[in-house]
Amino acid sequence: MQTAQRDTFRNWRYYINLVPAGLAVFGNLTGSWYSLSNFLFVFVILAFAEVLLPEDKNNDEGVDDVLPDLLMFLVLVAQFFAIGSLAYGVYQGYLTGFWIFGAALSTGAASGSLGIVIAHELIHKKQVFWNFLGRLLLFSVFNPYFYVHHLRIHHKWVGTGHDPVTAQKGESFYAFFFRTVRGQFMQSLELEKVRLKNQGRSPFGLNNYVVAVLSGAIFITLLIAYFFGYQVALAVLMQAILANLLLEYTNYIEHYGLSRDNKERVNEMHSWQSDKMVSRYFLIDLSRHADHHFHAAKPFNKLVSYQNSPVLPGGYTSMFLPALIPPLWFKLVDKRIPVQKSLA
């Protein structure tokens, strides 16, 4: 097999991922219309940029340097700076009234496009340090199920009826959201119960990851409310809600309508991919999702594009609005779904 070429600049391009946190911090500490800076950047500017900019199908690997690991560490710092600046901006009165909501949206957009995306990369790592940082990022948005479900169910059962993360053909994002959140939560809770019972431990104690995260989220929220006020706590909670909504939007478009038989091995046909430049580098090649499921342990800067994988009509940022309008989404995407086996 031909050895992949090395791309010296590929690892640098991913650093655009840090922009949302910077804009969120700026808006949180400035207030007024500036509080919406990152929200507008993510959902308007990037969406238009993605439509206008071409695809980048280059499959050259990023060089083996320190840049990918450094980026992931910087994202961790940036994530907590963004959330901290939101709390500080509300507490100090830089953000009042509607602008608290606007700042929470901007910060949540950063958490969803920055923190959760990097968390997804980190929880796939075997090293304890990086894996812990991934779980810490997920805790920053109070997500109690993704760590358990993504690794132990989603990757094993993607495209089948056992996986609530696989959106079915004709299923709207709204129907999917409630079905998948409930399904992921209940399956993760059950997995943790079984794991702890096998170890002779209490299935509902703090050794249960789902219970521990939920308890921690409630405790932190109440602590913030007690020391800094309910508005600060509400703002932090709102950014977490939007971040998790973006997570499930991403889950929706990654596998919508794609299915496989239970006994069929996961391959490059069971995930949607996009080589649009914005989605590629802004989301550290999450849009090359077909290769991620085909080779789950592969680092983001080595993911490749497949000629035969199903391709979304747009990238992740430009498909957000169509996903919220079911008739438009179905019209754009259903005709691209390859003939596959029914969910089983």
Image (cartoon, helix red, strand yellow):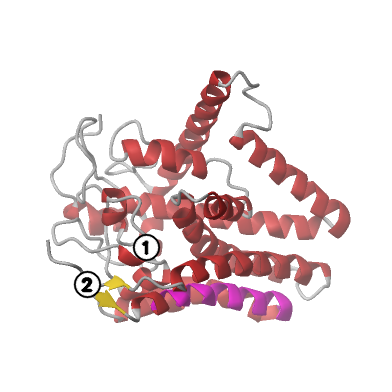
271 in relation to 299, above or below: above
Task: Name the quadrant containing residue 168.
Answer: top left
Q: Amino acid at mark 2?
A: Lys
Q: Nearer the viewer, residue 283 or 39?
A: 283
**Place of residue 231 in the rendered image (x, y in percent of width and height, measured from the top left):** 78, 59
Residue sitting at x 46%, y 77% = 16
> Which residue position is annotated with label 2?
57
294 in relation to 19, above or below: above
Binning the other alpha carbons within 10 Å of mark 1 as few (below 14), some (14 to 19) or many (20 upward) gives many
Residue 240 in view, yes or no = yes
Q: Which sits earlier in the primary sequence, circle 1 or circle 2?
A: 2
Name the chief secondary structure element in magenta.
helix
Task: Name the quadrant containing residue 312.
Answer: bottom left
Binning the other alpha carbons within 10 Å of mark 2 as few (below 14), some (14 to 19) or many (20 upward) gives some
Q: How many marks?
A: 2
Image-based side of 205 in relation to 297, left or right: right
Image-based side of 223 in relation to 137, left or right: right
Residue 209 is covered by the magenta coloring: no
Q: Amino acid at mark 1?
A: Phe
**Place of residue 71 in the rendered image (x, y in percent of width and height, measured from the top left):** 50, 70
Q: Secondary structure at mark 1?
A: helix
> Which residue position is annotated with label 1?
300
In front: label 1 or label 2: 1
Q: Secondary structure at mark 2?
A: loop
User: What are the residue bounds of the magenta stretch?
Assistant: 13-31
Quarter of the image where the C terminus is located: top left
Residue sitting at x 64%, y 41% = 213
